[in-house]
Amino acid sequence: MRRTPLELAAIATAAVPGLAPTATAYSPDDDADFDSALLLDAEGKRWRVRSPRHPEASTRLETEFMVLRAFAPATRAELPFHVPTIAGTVRQGALTTFVYAHLQGSMLSIEELSAGSPALAQEIGTALAAIHDLPLTLVTNADLPSYSANEFRQRKLNELDQAATTGKIPATLLRRWEHALEDVALWRFNTSVVHGDLHEDNLMVQDDSVTALTGWTDLRIGDPADDFAWLVASNESSFVEAVLGQYTQARRETPDVHLLRRAALLAEFALAQYLVKAMAAGHQSMTAEAESMLQTLSDDIDEQARRDAAQAAEDEAAENEAAALQASEAPAGQQPAVSVTAIPDAGPTVTVAAIPSDSQARDDSVETHHEPSPEPSLNGNEEAEPAASDGTAERRSQAADGDFPAAADHDDTSTASISVVNVTPLHAADRS
């Protein structure tokens, strides 16, 4: 049963002695896991209450408690944003409710963030880089999950198998995700510390600045693309590129080239995870919502595939038509343009004496300097001499007619056109 903000305010007074709320309001959160509220006290201070709805969600809050304790003052000082501080807790049976000293700033929707100034996009990129450059010991010392690139990929394959057993995932999506997960090159990346649950509800913004990041329940070592999935789901390419540009400059190491492709895949796959969670909780409305979003995504992908195929067919037809038109306009027997090399000097001048008479031939000798006589031309029934391998005989024959062969230039550097397929971004799920 969902708790109202007033009920959460009453719980908060038990967690923080002396707290006297004067106003309450609903706080956006993961509705399947938490009830949340914002409180305002008599001194104008703000607080945030997060109450788990089931034991697994309570465990996540207790994990966050350990994470926040791991942020030493020196680590907090180096971050370009603030990290929450837990003011108190109260246990109710198997569940523990946490009260946080609320941080400055407000939550904006993904549409408001993407429509913001370039400075805000740069702030988000800087914040992401700061998370991913945190020391790995922050996670390992707290005994939090740590995955290598291959372990992360295998984990996703296992989750895909689990989602497939529901029988509610469209075949188009199953094939698409399976092929992506089997592309080993796509999953070559350097692991880093990741927030693990980053989205607009965990981002506090004020005056184009990121003031704080909340929701540290899934901190781990894994794929940095995890923290970009919510951005890709916005379908605002210029916004994503601006964030990625600043992120690349701020990181201590260069991000891998497939980061956004994996982020798009993870954004899509999040719907399958949402379906599995809804079915496990027996939540019929969430299950129906997940099925609807999965079907919409599948339809969008099928429609994009049809458009791509139609465009490819149109391009091929246009190329064939242009080639046919060019051939029909060319004069008959026209040869392609060639380059002709000047004929080198044939050698020394040949001096020939007058032809002597028979008597002169017997009495006199004629001195003649000449080049070796050319090969006899082929005619009649004379047997042809085998052509020389270098084409010399052919050139001779053509030279006799006054023609010379032209070697057509051959370009062996051309490449076939490369078809680039973009992974279709996932439309962000409504978390309210």
Image (tube, rainbow, N blue to C red):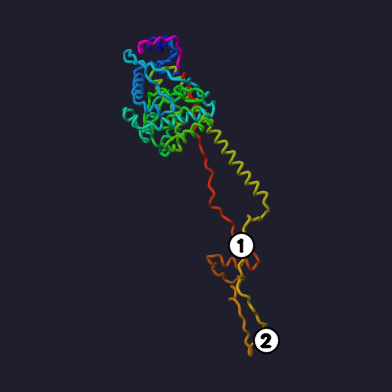
**Could you say which is closer to the camera, residue 308 or residue 251?**
251
Quarter of the image with the N terminus in it: top left
Magenta residues, start to end: 13-27
What separation in Å lies between label 1 and label 2 (alpha carbons)?
44 Å
Left or right of 326? Residue 283 is: left
Residue shown at the point (59%, 57%) measured from the top left: 408
According to the picture, the residue beneath numbered tag 1 turns out to be 341
Image height of 371 relative to 363, above or below: above
Nearer-N-terminus badge (1/2): 1
Residue 252: x percent and y percent?
42, 36
According to the picture, the residue beneath numbered tag 2 turns out to be 357
Image height of 151 relative to 374, above or below: above
Q: How many marks?
A: 2
**Could you say which is closer to the camera, residue 26 or residue 331?**
26
**Could you say which is closer to the camera, residue 68 or residue 418?**
68
- Please, what secondary structure does the residue beneath circle 1 have? loop
Q: What residue type is disc 2 on? A: Ser
Whether residue 43 is visible? yes
Residue shown at the point (62%, 57%) measured from the top left: 338
Q: What residue type is disc 1 on? A: Thr
Report the mark closest to the observer, 1 or 2.
1
Residue 140: x percent and y percent?
32, 30
Residue 280: x percent and y percent?
38, 20
- Please, what secondary structure does the residue beneath circle 2 have? loop
Res 38 quadrant in image: top left
Crowd band around label 1 with a 10 angstrom C-alpha radius: few (<14), some (14–19), many (20+): few
Residue shown at the point (63%, 77%) measured from the top left: 350
Q: Is residue 22 magenta?
A: yes
Residue 389: x percent and y percent?
52, 65
Whether residue 171 is visible? no
**Label for residue 21?**
none
Crowd band around label 2 with a 10 angstrom C-alpha radius: few (<14), some (14–19), many (20+): few
